[in-house]
Image (cartoon, rainbow, N blue to C red):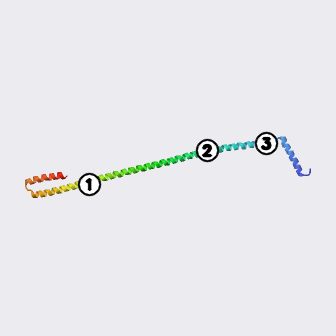
Amino acid sequence: MFAQPEFWVAVSFVILMAVFAYFGVHRTVLTALDHRSERIRAELDDARRLKDEAAKLLAEYKARHAKAEAEAQEIIASAKAEAERIAAEAKTKMEDFVARRTKTAESKIALAEAQALADVRAAAADAAVTAASTILAQSVRGPVADDLLAKGITEVKAKLN
């Protein structure tokens, strides 16, 4: 039994444990383990706290994102409404412009017709005066004829114009 190496290893181990117990190494090891346990617990608590903060930040950013999306949709709707209003206004202005141009063109046409009618009347009056003066000059002679001719021409011009 004393010649077996396992026996001496067992005796050395028991002596080592007795020395450790005498000097209180087990308390030091247990204290170190307790400190390590506390440090791990503190790290876990910090990790939970950081996780909660991250979750709060994520929720806050999601809320901001939703608010920004809503604002963007509102801006788009407003821009569409403004574009439709501008298009309707432009259409109305265009219709007014076309109506004014049509009215102007119609008034110019009416004025041209009136001018042409006046020109035709004047030409007809001139032709009638010339024809009347020619006929009267050939049929009536003397000072009475000249006086009648002048009065007739003046009356015809006044009536035709």
- Disc 3 from disc 1: Cα separation: 122 Å
What residue would you read off at disc 3? 30
- Judged by depth in the image, the label closer to the viewer, 3 or 1, is 1
Distance CA(mark 1)–CA(mark 2): 82 Å
Instruction: Say what amino acid the circle numbered 1 marks.
Output: Glu
Tag 2 secondary structure: helix
For this rendering, which residue is in front, 137 or 17?
A: 137
**Residue at x 65%, y 44% (from the top left corner):** 52
First in sequence: mark 2 or mark 3? 3
Q: Amino acid at mark 3?
A: Leu
Q: Residue 160: where, in percent of width, then height?
A: 18, 53
In terms of depth relative to the viewer, which is nearer, 55 or 30?
55
| Label 3: how many Cα within 10 Å (few below 14, some 14–19, many 20+) | few
Q: Amino acid at mark 2?
A: Leu
Q: Please state if 19 lies on the left or on the right of 33 as rendered.
A: right
Front tag of 1 and 2: 1
Where is residue 132 shown, x and y percent of the image?
14, 56
* Residue that label 1 marks: 113
Which comes before the other along the chain, label 1 or label 2?
Answer: 2
Residue 94: image x %, image y %? 38, 51
User: Compared to 109, does 55 lie above or below?
Assistant: above
**Residue at x 85%, y 44% (from the top left corner):** 17
- For marks 3 and 1, the one nearer the N-term is 3
Question: Where is residue 73 drawn, in percent x and y?
Answer: 51, 48
- Element type at mark 1: helix
> Which residue in the structure is indicated by mark 2?
57
